[in-house]
Each structure stands twice: as structure tokens, then as C-alpha cells.
Image (cartoon, rainbow, N blue to C red):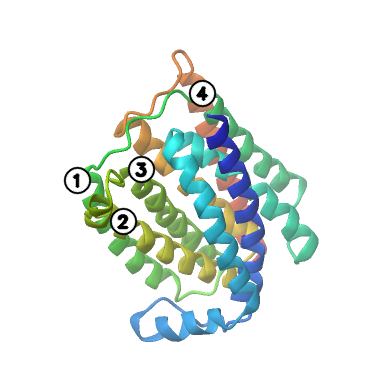
Amino acid sequence: MFLGLSAALAAAVLFGIAAILQAVGSRKVPTESELNPRRFFSFVVALLRQPAFLGALALQLAGFVLHFVALRLLPLYLAQAGIAVSLVVTALLATRLMSDQLSLLEWSAVIAVCVGLGLLAVAAGHAGANAPHHALTVGIAVGLVAIAVLGGVASRSPGGASTAILGLLAGLGYAGVAISARLLDDSSIGALLSSPSSYTLPLSGALAFILYSLALQRGSVTLATTPMIALQTITPAAVGVFVLDDAVRAGWWPLAVLGFLLSAAGSLVLVRFESVKV
């Protein structure tokens, strides 16, 4: 478990720094960019021309390698709780390097999210088996289509609500990455190449990365990041416990529920107050 937690926390630091670089690069691309088939290619090309964005991409890839290790060794909710520490890294850097300013209430909300996710970590039991799951794989594929469609609609608006919605959708995309990583059949090279999860994983990650970039264009880093972190943590946690047999420690369910409520409430506070400022 120590190796998995260490990998998750190291990944969180990389993801937190990458979020700031991604925001810098994304904001140099015209804000009228939206997720639709006609503009998608030009939008991606414009992003790839930004050195800060390329730096973010490199850090994201390095972070994913560490995150993947955590996903294979830990229950999904514990691996994702470790990644959620990136919210603190992002918030600290955003207040120092960018124009984001958080009030006492908003800092309290950030702390609530992290404490809540920490409680989920403390309540962690053993991880379920890493094995293919047909229904989940189909669900991820259908979900990717729905996320892309909703992202296209949300990206047409430049306001704070659009930032939060795009952040939420990005979080669902990254949740698909985490779940796909658990479903990979890595028993052999042939099994890995034929596993549907080998393809839903990179597609989920790419879609989430683009949606997060669009969110960062439209509002504050904190507003875009908080719902993303919450959804990419809570969704795989629920799937892990209720579908993939990830265990909660005996007698620790109340603490796990409290952790969920704290993280959800903190996210809602940040989305509400940040959207008013945008």
C-alpha cells in the first residue's frame, strides 16, 4: 500500500503543477474555441503551439504513469483520494502565480474537499481484483459519447457556469481513465491489445484533457479544477466499491460517508462562489 500511496501523491504534485501550465497555455488560445468537429483540429493545433501547454502535457503523462501504478495497487477511492491533493497544489500556485484570489470561505472549502477525501482514504480496505468487466466497458464507451456531446454544448458559452460544467465533464472523463486502468487485461501482450479498456483509457484521457483546457479558458483555475477533482474521485470510488469489490474497512462506513459529504459540499461552495466572481 505504501508504494501505491507514494505514487498517488507524487502524481498529485505533478498534476497540480500541470494544471497551472495548462491554464497559461489554454488562455493564449482564443476563448471562442469550442468543442465541435469543425474547430476541434484547429483548437488542438493552437494548444500544441503553446510551450506552457506542452509542458503541462509532459507533466500529465509523467503523472499518469505514477497514477497508473496507484490504480493497480490501491482501491479506486484511495488512489483517487491521493490524486485529489493536486487541488491544494493548484490552488496555492493559482493564488501566487495567477489572478485567482480565494476568500476564507473558499479556502475552507478547499480544505473540506481534501479532508473529506482524506477520510475516504482512512476508511480504505483492500482493493478488488483487476479484471475485465463488459458492462462497465460499454458504459464507459457510451459515457464518452455523452460527455463529448455535452462538452460541445457547454463550450459555446464563455461564462462561469460553462467553466464549472466543463470541469465536471472533464472529471467524468478522467474517471473513465481510472476505471479503464482497473479493467485492463494485462495477462499477456495479446490480451492487452485486444482489451477494449486499452482504447477507452487514452480516449477518456484525451477528451478530459481537452475539456479541462476549455474550462481553464473561461474561468478561474479553482473553478475549473475543483469539480473536476471531485468527479474524478467520487465516480471511480463508487464504481470500485459497488461494482469492483473494493472494500471499506469494517465499521468505517460512517467515516466514508462523512468524507463524501465533506468533499461534495466543499466542491459546491467553490463552484457557487467562484462562478459569481467570473
Proximity of marks 2 and 4: CB atoms separated by less than 8 Å: no
Mark 2 vs mark 3, CA separation in Å: 11 Å
Vertical position of residue 66 compared to residue 157: above or below: above
Say which residue appears at 36% left-offset and 31% top-offset. Answer: 241
Q: Residue furthest right?
A: 96
Find disc 3 in the rendering and name its residue: 182
Give the residue displayed 56% in from the left and 25% down from the top. Answer: 122
> What separation in Å lies between label 2 and label 1 (alpha carbons)?
13 Å
Viewer-side label of 2, 1: 2
- Say if residue 108 shows up in the picture: yes
- Residue highlighted by disc 2: 198
Q: Amino acid at mark 3?
A: Arg
Evaluate if marks 2 and 3 touch, with contact meaning CB atoms under 8 Å apart: no
Q: What amino acid does circle 1 point to?
A: His
Q: Nearer the viewer, mark 1 or mark 4?
A: 1
> What residue sits right under mark 4 in the picture?
123
